């Protein structure tokens, strides 16, 4: 049975992704930060880890790109999850009974419009959505609610007071599945890759790489730059590409490896969007 590290606890969005990707036959290592999650696989406590990497509203989770790079982690797969925020509390309470709502800062921000209609409620930032639901249940905390995935209400015996309270309904997060060893994904199953490289600070260097991507029939689905802290005004680029044939991708990566410095393949895997 595989042991999978997730950020958060049972009932979190990472738990939902783990269940969707692996099924029920897994063990979970619940980590309250991404640093702890990375340590879990580096120390072999877990076989693989699930890491949120970008959100359609919040954008890229920059620190997680840095973690992937710094620890030479390998992406072996990805999953996309539509994010829904539900307001939940102990049973037999209404919105009027609630005086405080706890959740992750991002969840609170994404539900801001809903709470403008309920000014009697104090919003409090917390570490993890599902952990709040668990504390409410274990402490029998009346008058306190959590914003969390629906699965949290099922696991911890809470009642959903209001369903899908997020302001923007089209909200999705991309998660990557990572491990320390280089994956052995077969070429036939690979149609997406995550690459990292650096370029000289001169005109047209990035454009030249992007031309290679286009000329080799690759589809650029993501580009993210991170500053090189030890080298002011120099940047590392993180790029995701999809492709129809592995030969096109193979040609492109051989050319980019010549044009760029510190070229690294973060992962070659199956596109999670089909």
Image (tube, rainbow, N blue to C red):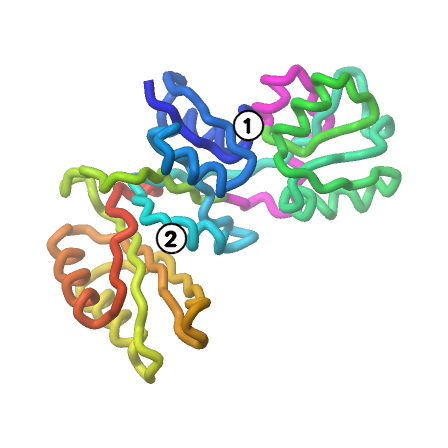
Q: CA distance from mark 1 to mark 2?
A: 25 Å
Asked whether, in this view, residue 274 is left or right of residue 87, the answer is left
Residue at figure coordinates x 45%, y 75% from the top left: 232
Residue 234 located within the stretch drawn in magenta: no
Picture quadrant where residue 91 is located: top right
Position of 213 relative to 70 (above/below):
below
Asked whether, in this view, residue 123 is left or right of residue 164, the answer is right
Residue 109 percent across, percent down from the top left: 68, 48
Residue at figure coordinates x 36%, y 53% from the top left: 69
Residue 263 percent across, percent down from the top left: 25, 62
Position of 203 relative to 190 (above/below):
below
Residue 235 percent across, percent down from the top left: 39, 70
Residue wearing tag 2: 70
Q: Kindly state the secondary structure of the residue where label 1 is placed.
A: loop
Q: Kindly state the secondary structure of the residue where label 2 is placed.
A: helix
Callout in the foreground (1, 2): 2
Picture quadrant where residue 274 is located: top left
Read off the magenta span.
150-172
Position of 41 relative to 210 (above/below):
above
Disc number at residue 9? 1
Residue at figure coordinates x 69%, y 19% from the top left: 158
Q: What is the crowding at mark 2: few (fewer than 14 residues within 10 Å), some, or many (at least 20)?
A: few
Position of 79 relative to 247 (above/below):
above
Q: Earlier in the sequence, mark 1 or mark 2?
A: 1
**Foreground: 274 or 188?**
188
Quarter of the N terminus within the rendering: top left
Q: What is the crowding at mark 1: few (fewer than 14 residues within 10 Å), some, or many (at least 20)?
A: many
Picture quadrant where residue 98 is located: top right
Residue 102 percent across, percent down from the top left: 73, 35
């Amino acid at each position: 049975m595989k042991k999978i590290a997730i950020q958060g606890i049972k009932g979190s969005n990472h738990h939902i992704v783990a269940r969707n990707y692996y099924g029920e036959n897994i063990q979970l290592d619940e980590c309250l930060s991404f640093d702890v999650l990375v340590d879990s696989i580096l120390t072999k406590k877990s076989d693989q880890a699930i890491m949120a990497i970008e959100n359609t509203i919040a954008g890229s989770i920059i620190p997680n790109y840095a973690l992937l790079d710094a620890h030479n982690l390998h992406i072996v797969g990805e999953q996309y999850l539509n994010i829904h925020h539900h307001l939940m509390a102990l049973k037999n309470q209404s919105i009027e009974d609630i005086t405080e709502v706890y959740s992750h800062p991002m969840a609170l921000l994404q539900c801001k419009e809903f709470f403008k209609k309920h000014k009697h409620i104090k919003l409090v930032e917390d570490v993890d959505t599902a952990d709040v639901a668990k504390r409410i249940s274990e402490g029998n905390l009346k008058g306190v609610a959590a914003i969390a995935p629906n699965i949290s209400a099922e696991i911890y015996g809470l009642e959903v007071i209001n369903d899908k309270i997020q302001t923007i309904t089209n909200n999705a997060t991309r998660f990557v599945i990572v491990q320390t060893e280089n994956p052995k994904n077969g070429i036939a199953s690979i149609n997406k890759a995550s690459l990292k490289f650096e370029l000289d600070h001169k005109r047209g260097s990035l454009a030249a790489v992007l031309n290679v991507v286009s000329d080799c029939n690759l589809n650029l689905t993501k580009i993210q730059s991170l500053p090189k802290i030890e080298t002011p005004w120099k940047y590392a680029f993180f790029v995701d590409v999809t492709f129809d044939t592995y030969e096109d991708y193979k040609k492109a990566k051989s050319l980019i490896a010549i044009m760029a410095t510190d070229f690294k393949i973060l992962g070659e895997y199956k596109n999670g969007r089909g």
